Image: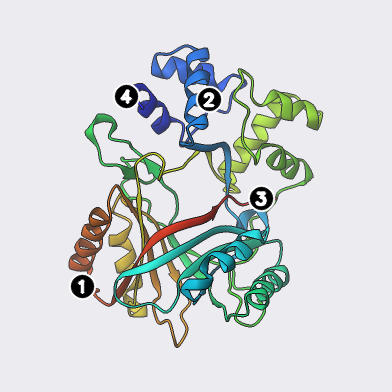
Amino acid sequence: MDETDRRLLVRIQGEFPLVPRPFAMLGTELGMTEGEVIRRLSALCGRGLIRRIGPVLDPERVGRVGALVAMAVPDDRIEAVAAAVSACPAVTHNYQRVPVEGSCPYSLWFTLTAPSQEALGEAVAGIGRAAGLPVTILPVRRKFKIGVRFNFNVGGASAPRANGPDRADHGWTSQPCHRGSPPPGCGTAGLSSSAVLDGTDRGILRELQDGLPLVAEPYAEAAARLGMPVEALLERLRAMLARGEVRRMGASIAHRNAGIAANVMCVWRVPAEQVDAFAREAVRFDAITHCYERATTPEWPYNAYAMIHGRTQAACEAVIRELCQRTGQADYVALLSTREFKKTWTRL
């Protein structure tokens, strides 16, 4: 991957052009022809560095509900159980994680989304029955930061960044999750009251959810199938971005293949009245790509979660140490992701 590839990868992770010929616009910005942009992106996809280019959805705002689930799986069953979990269509992410600091009874961690709390509960219960193991469901209470862009040392900057380098608030939000009536033990994330997608919007997202084709006019085929002008499709995409149903339009990067090999999920036990202060510090770190407050259980009292990416495990651990120093919060467990069994995206 040369410097031009790196510049292109950084650019396409967000604010992907919503114009009929987006690759031509990117070429103008980056000093390349449209054809060179398409050739380079095709090569990067072929090498497994780009998963897809398309809309990244906010699950709640498009009417989905979700949960993080943890399971204590014996070592000799991890592959079989992981395969069964990954086979569930509702599962979007599935990882084996091992503690590198602190102790943890859980070895398999997965997320899933569904169209309703009832469907979510059924999916989780079905996984537990199939595995013959208990499941621990850890719903989100508040979201403080979501989203990642990798810088790839363009201009000498650090590897991961989030929400752009010039945001004065460093990506800070405090977004409570919907307090619906989930099945027992099954989380509180739910349908946002702001979800206003109509059938045409949903049709557009379904057409684009597997990624744009790498052709000069990538929106044209979807527009033709939907029987609408390209500009009408793009206007609806712009509206969904403005409302938040589409979190961003851009490339999803296979960060491990691109050299960002280490991923640590670190969880802290933070007093409730100190969570906001902790989160405000956490989101300042470029290497922290996601920050949540989650529900706890008697067996798992950790409520503050941060996802940390780095080129090495040591780099992630350095972030954890500095965050502990800044916040005074030192009751934590750090879990290294050792195997990625499944990683996909929210689908309609």
Q: Which residue is mark 3?
A: 347
Q: Residues within 10 Å of mark 4 (few under 14, many from 20)?
A: few
- Residue at the right extreme? 227
Residue 328: which disc?
1
Please, is residue 125 above or below residue 30 in the view?
Answer: below
When asked about the image quadrant of residue 273, the answer is bottom left
Tell whether label 4 touches label 1 (CB within 8 Å).
Answer: no
Label 2 – label 4 distance at C-alpha? 16 Å
Q: Amino acid at mark 1?
A: Gly
Q: Select label 3 or label 1 by which is in front.
A: 3
Residue 35 x, y percent position in the rendering:
52, 13
Q: Amino acid at mark 4?
A: Glu
Tell whether label 4 touches label 2 (CB within 8 Å).
Answer: no
Assign the N terminus to one quadrant of the image: top left
When asked about the image quadrant of residue 217, the answer is top right
Q: As drawn, is 283 to the left or to the right of 248? A: left
Tell whether label 3 touches label 2 (CB within 8 Å).
Answer: no
Give the residue at x 55% y 22%. 22
Residue 339 x, y percent position in the rendering:
45, 58
Identify the mark nearer the N-term, 2 or 1: 2
Q: Which residue is mark 4?
A: 3
Identify the mark nearer the N-term, 2 or 4: 4
Q: Secondary structure at mark 3?
A: loop
